[in-house]
Amino acid sequence: MNRPLEMAAAPRDRIECVAAATGAPLGSVPVDDPASVRAAVSRARRAQHDFAHADFARRRRLLGRLSDRIVEEIDTICGWVVEDSGKTREHALMGEVWPVLEKLRWTMRHGERHLAPERVSPGIFAHKTAYLRYEPLGVVGAIVPWNYPFQNLLGPIVTALFAGNAIVLKPSEHVAFSSEKIAGLVREVLREAGEDPDLVQIVQGYAETGQALIAAGIDGLLFIGSVQNGKKVLAAAAEQVIPVVLELGGKDPFIVCDDADLEQAVHGAFAGCFISAGQNCVAAERLLVHKDVYDRFVARVAELASKLRQGPPGLERVVDVGAMTTPMQREIVERLVADAIAKGAQVVAGGEPVRSAGGNFVAPTVLADVRPHMDIFREEVFGPVMCITKVVDDEDAVELANATAYGLGASVFSRDLERARRIVRRLEAGMCAINDFGGLTYMAQDLTFGGVKASGFGRMNGRDGLRAMCRQKSVLDERVPLGIANKLFPVGPKDYQRIAAAVRMIYGRGLGARLRGAARLVRGLGSSSS
């Protein structure tokens, strides 16, 4: 779940934190310099030395205590997230706390099965056994953005700890206030569970802090952010030969076929466009609606959009869409909307800049007749904007869906499930949902989360997400100790002929070829004994 990590032009000693919806000051957080970052990684490594040998029962107990604490502190956690990010309480609960609790539940229930030694075929070595071991990387680094301040921290923490690692996280400077409190809560749970709290470290700052983390001797890295910053991170990690998981955002298509249940599709579109004010890497950024249902779809969207409420979230009032987290992102959204309108997009709802004292608000906006030549069709919006494009058939929809550098998620709506599945098979995306918003794939923790093309590589969640936090070790073991030396030296005069005969016997095509190879091998062995 991501957005570019906007970095300050020059380093400062402290981060001044403000509430996204009101501009009210929240306090300040000290910036970690490179020496502080190296010290954090060193503390994490010392703590991980013992934890690497923790059995799965111990790891499950730790995650169980963390889950219990999150449930107890739901209101407090949502309050931190709302204050720092500007999203509504409901979206903080549904989009942050709930997915983390589901990740914890899934990991405690299924994690051991995916990380236990895995038996595989020994191939031609019938007298041996073969298996794969999944061992901790050591100290994992995570550089995460501002759009999901709780989930972006806890997701990597849960996976890293269950795999036996320590983790050092660098959150976005835009959510430094809540990140400090969230990390403190996790460290309290570690201490109460009898574990070293230094297993989880947080370092705060701007671009320089992230660069220092990559260079501080970590053993693996998760980066969530923009393509531009992802390339820089990958280059820096390559210098250190660090394995990297990159989650770099998307431009997800949302295809509505002419036989779709329109009410289902419309509400799926609202979820895809307006959850967390659209600041979601798997947001439904391009609605591709069949021409035969296009007008009805737009009319129903307009009806619902007119009822959306916006403003600073709080206990006293219920709002549907909160604020943007950063003023920079608000300006990007406003620019893209203005460009689309200038190039012929029709405003169905919103469209005008919102100027609120202190708050970073963008009105929930619906644009119809969005065309591929508009900037908003190609660039990631990352804001509360629904962009609707008319398509003539499934072929047109698939062609437009794939006409992007990104390939993260996708949604397809059709009552004909085989038709929807055919479309899904042709989409260039890492995750797809049929008759639902594609972002819901995140809640099915057995599914991996990640994209293709410019959306990155590597996976979070599921089996592959856990194993991404591990070193894979291949072991060829003894099944039946034969006690016979495998003598290769010195080379005998007939060795080549005997080896060639064995290869023909094993790999020859057809029974005849294999029998001829066996005969040659027997003759070769016979001449060797004589």
Image (tube, helix red, strand yellow):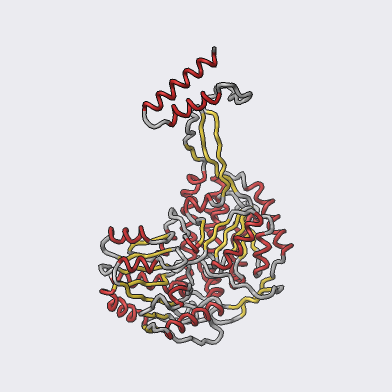
Q: Is residue 124 above or below residue 284?
A: above
Q: Residue at x 57, y 64 (%)?
A: 230
For residue 367, side relative to residue 22 (left or right) = left
Quadrant of residue 208 within the rendered picture: bottom right
Say which of 373 and 23 sits in front.
373
The front one of 384 and 257 is 257
Left or right position of 311 against 211: left
Q: Nearer the viewer, residue 253 or 28?
A: 253
Residue occupying the point 44% across, 60% down: 442
Residue at point 65% right, 76% down? Answer: 16
The outermost residue toward the right is 35
Would you place residue 518 above or below residue 11 in this image? above
Residue 213 drawn at (x, y percent): 66, 61
Q: Is residue 489 left or right of residue 128?
A: right
Q: Looking at the picture, does residue 162 appear above or below residue 222?
A: above
Question: Residue 46: image x %, image y %?
Answer: 69, 51
**Quarter of the rendering containing residue 69:** bottom right
Question: Does 377 sit above or below residue 442?
Answer: below
Instruction: Please provide percent x and percent y for residue 1.
Output: 50, 65
Q: Looking at the picture, how far across and down is residue 434, in whole percent?
A: 34, 62
Any part of residue 125 in sight:
yes
- Point out the image quarter for the C terminus: top right
**Is residue 184 visible from the viewing direction of this image?**
no
